[in-house]
């Protein structure tokens, strides 16, 4: 999947899948029931991936879980592409294959893998709010690359950094391990780097084909890192809780395939301003699910910092859409 760096709203949760380039819907198109169904899927499913990750890492090692998830999802998507478009649709030259692999390593190994590792100690809701700051990092990386996103975007960056400062309070106070908080921030930075790189590297023309190689490269990288960390030592698949297996299957099918397909259709069938709202709805969904299902505490830093980050993302998204 190739998501342009000029569109910060295109960065999904690290537990989800990077969407296709945003294409504006034809003017005047009526917003029908199918649009609202697709939007609800993206809201709920991508917002729920953090909860799913939390269940997975309870009994499955984090990098092995992340890697295997995306290898399976990549193979399934490859089969779908070959079935719908023919095997030739999967052919790419070495240069574009290398670019897709690099982007996949940044997004999936760096972004999703580190979130999996962090959620062994960090509440799912807090992880989602920290990752919600991806548009902030995207603006900073674009600036470093010589672009000038605009005053509104920079204002969003300043607000977002303030929100991140508040969100790190639980780690600094000892309520939550600061190491886990820093891991999520690093994951968000690497995801942002993957987003920016995908717009500057020669990627496969077919976004679904690009997604296949990103998933496979990132997934293989996750498994390799898991093996290097020794996650396989003492790991007994028979001892994995049923909830972890179910959550892993949910992430593969719903998080990486169904929600991705819904978003790919949505950005071609609805106003982009409407599709972009997932960027600030997903973290809210994640926090609510974490609170309701896992009884994760809603402390004042999480509520205040989360509200500030969501406001910053809203400002950046609205500025970019007007640009």
Image (cartoon, helix red, strand yellow):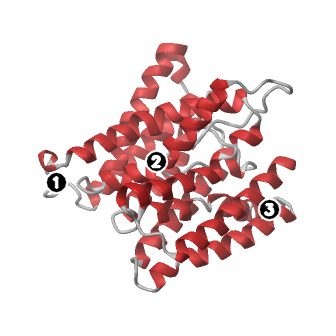
Q: Which residue is mark 2?
A: 48
Question: How crowded is the residue under tag 1: few (<14 C-alpha within 10 Å), some, or many (20+)?
Answer: few
Q: Nearer the viewer, mark 1 or mark 3?
A: 3
- Decide if residue 193 is on the left or right side of residue 168: right
User: Is 102 on the left or on the right of 153, as rendered?
Assistant: left
- The residue wearing badge 1 is 235
Element class at badge 2: helix
Q: Position of residue 11 (x, y in %)?
A: 62, 49
Distance (Cα) linking label 1 and label 3 = 46 Å
Would you place residue 323 above or below residue 1 in this image? Answer: below
What is the spatial separation of the Cα atoms under label 2 and label 1, in whole angstroms?
26 Å
**Against 3, is 30 above or below?**
above
Left or right position of 221 against 304: left
* Circle nearer the N terminus (3, 2): 2
Depth check, mark 3 against mark 2: the one in front is 2
Image depth: mark 2 or mark 1 in front: 2
Report which residue position mark 3 lands on. 153
């Amino acid at each position: 999947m190739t998501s342009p760096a000029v569109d910060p709203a295109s960065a999904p949760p690290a537990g989800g899948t990077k969407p296709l380039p945003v294409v504006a819907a034809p003017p005047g198109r009526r917003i029908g029931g199918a649009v609202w169904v697709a939007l609800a899927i993206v809201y709920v499913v991508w917002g729920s991936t953090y909860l799913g990750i939390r269940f997975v890492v309870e009994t499955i090692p984090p990098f092995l879980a992340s890697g295997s998830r995306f290898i399976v999802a990549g193979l399934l998507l490859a089969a779908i592409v070959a079935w719908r478009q023919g095997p030739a649709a999967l052919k790419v030259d070495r240069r574009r294959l290398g670019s897709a692999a690099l982007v996949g390593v940044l997004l999936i190994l760096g972004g999703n893998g580190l979130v999996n590792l962090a959620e062994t100690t960090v509440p799912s809701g807090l992880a989602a709010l920290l990752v919600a700051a991806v548009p902030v990092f995207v603006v900073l990386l674009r600036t470093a690359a010589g672009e000038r996103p605009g005053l509104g975007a920079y204002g969003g960056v300043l607000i977002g950094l303030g929100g991140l400062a508040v969100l790190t309070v639980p780690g600094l106070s000892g309520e939550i391990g600061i190491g886990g908080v820093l891991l999520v921030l690093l994951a968000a930075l690497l995801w942002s780097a993957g987003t920016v790189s995908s717009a500057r590297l020669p990627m496969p023309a077919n976004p679904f084909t690009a997604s296949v190689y990103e998933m496979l490269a990132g997934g293989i990288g996750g498994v390799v890192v898991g093996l290097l960390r020794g996650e396989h030592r003492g790991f007994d698949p028979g001892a994995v809780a049923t909830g972890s297996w179910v959550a892993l299957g949910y992430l593969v099918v719903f998080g990486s395939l169904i929600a991705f397909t819904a978003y790919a259709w949505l950005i071609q069938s609805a106003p982009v301003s409407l599709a972009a709202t997932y960027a600030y709805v997903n973290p809210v969904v994640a926090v609510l699910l974490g609170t309701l299902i896992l009884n994760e505490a809603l402390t004042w830093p999480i509520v205040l910092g989360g509200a500030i980050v969501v406001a910053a993302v809203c400002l950046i998204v609205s500025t970019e859409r007007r640009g």
